[in-house]
Amino acid sequence: MAIWNYRYYLIPSAAIRNKFNANKDIILDEYRSNGFQNFNENKSFENYFIDNDVILLSIINEAKKQLKLKESWDKDAIMFCDNFGNSLTVWPDDIECVLDLRFDYTEFIQKTIDWAIKYNCLLVIGKTGNVVSPNINNLIYEIKAYLESKPWPI
């Protein structure tokens, strides 16, 4: 991942509520970045889309209308992008959003937040695993924290 890329994920809120106590901050460890030295190719991740696959299909349909289909490097991934290097990848068990922080990403994040609200998803922040409600202020706060943690300008 390039230093100017920022990742977040859409996860069904019902799946999160079923697993965690909603009265505290939630961190999904599997989305946290622990550095390459801790990489384990055999590690399995929870599929939060079991019994929620209608959300995957709905977001694919939304993306088909509002983004450009992009050639995928994996048969299981359906990839979309905008004109500014931002992308959305839908996997059978994941919806990944990648921002290119060098260019305009505001319209892209507003689309993904609108979809998250419409389809009752929460946002999971890449690197930290923080789970936040789909709100532009929450996401901008997380992006700023990410940028401030970098020792170099992007």
Image: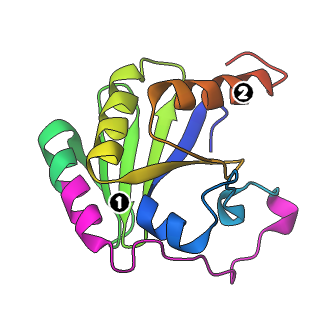
Q: Nearer the viewer, residue 71 or 121?
A: 121
Residue 38: x, y in percent?
Answer: 84, 67
Give me the disc on residue 90: 1
- The residue at the far left in this view is 65
Q: Residue at x 44, y 39 (%)?
A: 134
Quick check: 130 above or below 22? above
Left or right: 23, with 33 as reference point:
left
Q: Residues within 10 Å of mark 2 (few under 14, many from 20)?
A: few
Q: Does residue 59 show up magenta in the picture?
A: yes
Disc 2 on helix, strand or loop? Answer: helix
Q: Amino acid at mark 2?
A: Ala
Left or right: 53, with 21 as reference point:
left
Q: Which residue is mark 2?
A: 145
Residue 79: x, y in percent?
Answer: 32, 53
Q: Quadrant of the N terminus?
A: top right
Residue 5: quarter of image: top right
Residue 46: quarter of image: bottom right
Which region shows up in magenta?
Answer: 36-60
Distance between the Cα atoms at labels 1 and 2? Answer: 26 Å
Q: Does residue 92 show up magenta in the picture?
A: no
Left or right: 12, with 38 as reference point:
left
Residue 133: x, y in percent?
Answer: 50, 42
Q: Residues within 10 Å of mark 1 (few under 14, many from 20)?
A: many
Q: Nearer the viewer, residue 107 or 131?
A: 131
Residue 58: x, y in percent?
Answer: 20, 58
Q: Residue at x 67, y 33 (%)?
A: 3
Q: Nearer the viewer, residue 128 or 75?
A: 128
